[in-house]
Amino acid sequence: MINLSPPRFFQRFFKNIIWNFPDEKEGVFLTFDDGPTQGVTPWVLDQLARYNAKATFFCLAKNVEMNPDIFERVVREGHAIGNHSYSHIKGWRTDTTQYIQDVIYANSFLHTNLYRPPYGRITARQFRLITYQYKIVLWDVLSMDYSRRVSPKKVTKFVIDNVKLGSIVVFHDSLKAERNLRYALPRVLDAITATGMVCKPIVIPRKNIRES
């Protein structure tokens, strides 16, 4: 499988983006995009609870609006929340004013200072405006769980082979990813636990926004 982690020079260039936590001493950071989703997110929460694992859910606010009870459970069980827009808007194809309005509206449901652009794509102007209010969080391990062309075993192997201390791993608590996720997540949690690492939520103090 192709390594989809961003090149290191690219990571160094965009200093206002969190790709991983290189100074982390004990943890890894599992993240879940696109939920909350009926039938999928509750199962994810059950798996995390089995391992006493915490994660970060980059939620679509339209799904929070439809599934407030699941969202409340995510928060109640101690997981972090990130903004993934209201409508999974495409930054490269969207007027900047419309894009920012979508993100602002999403945060009326989510109340977070973390943001992950859908598809990981955002224009330079959108990026500049977003970073005044949010810390943008991307990843260094993309599971590819959403791809129908990638088998559950390959998703699992890719994550286990690449995760390390401080890694930010992307999964999706969506119907599209459900087949791969149901196979991969328990096995990834097993592997992480076996190494002695712990799964932690992403927490960025607001005073650390716009550091550079």
Image (tube, rainbow, N blue to C red):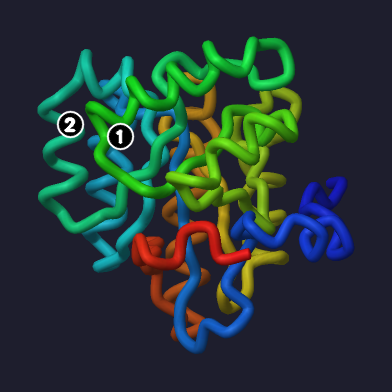
Numbered marks: total = 2
Does residue 89 appear left or right of residue 112 in this picture? right
Residue in front for this viewpoint, 99 or 109: 99
Q: Earlier in the sequence, mark 2 or mark 1?
A: 1
Amino acid on which the number 1 mark rests in the picture: Thr
The residue under label 1 is 41
Residue shown at 87% from the left, 46% from the top: 2
Does residue 109 appear left or right of residue 37 in this picture? left
Amino acid on which the number 2 mark rests in the picture: Ile
**Mark closer to the observer (2, 1):** 2
* In the depicted structure, whether residue 175 falls above or below residue 202: above
Residue in front for this viewpoint, 161 or 200: 200
Residue shown at 46% from the left, 77% from the top: 27
Residue shown at 40% from the left, 76% from the top: 198
Q: Position of residue 49 (x, y in %)?
A: 22, 58
Q: Splitting the image into 4 quarters, where does residue 58 fall?
A: top left
Residue shown at 37% from the left, 26% from the top: 104
Q: Are marks 2 and 1 in contact (CB under 8 Å)?
A: yes
Q: Position of residue 129 (x, y in %)?
A: 57, 36
The residue under label 2 is 70
- Mark 2 packing: few (<14 Cα in 10 Å), some, or many (20+)? many
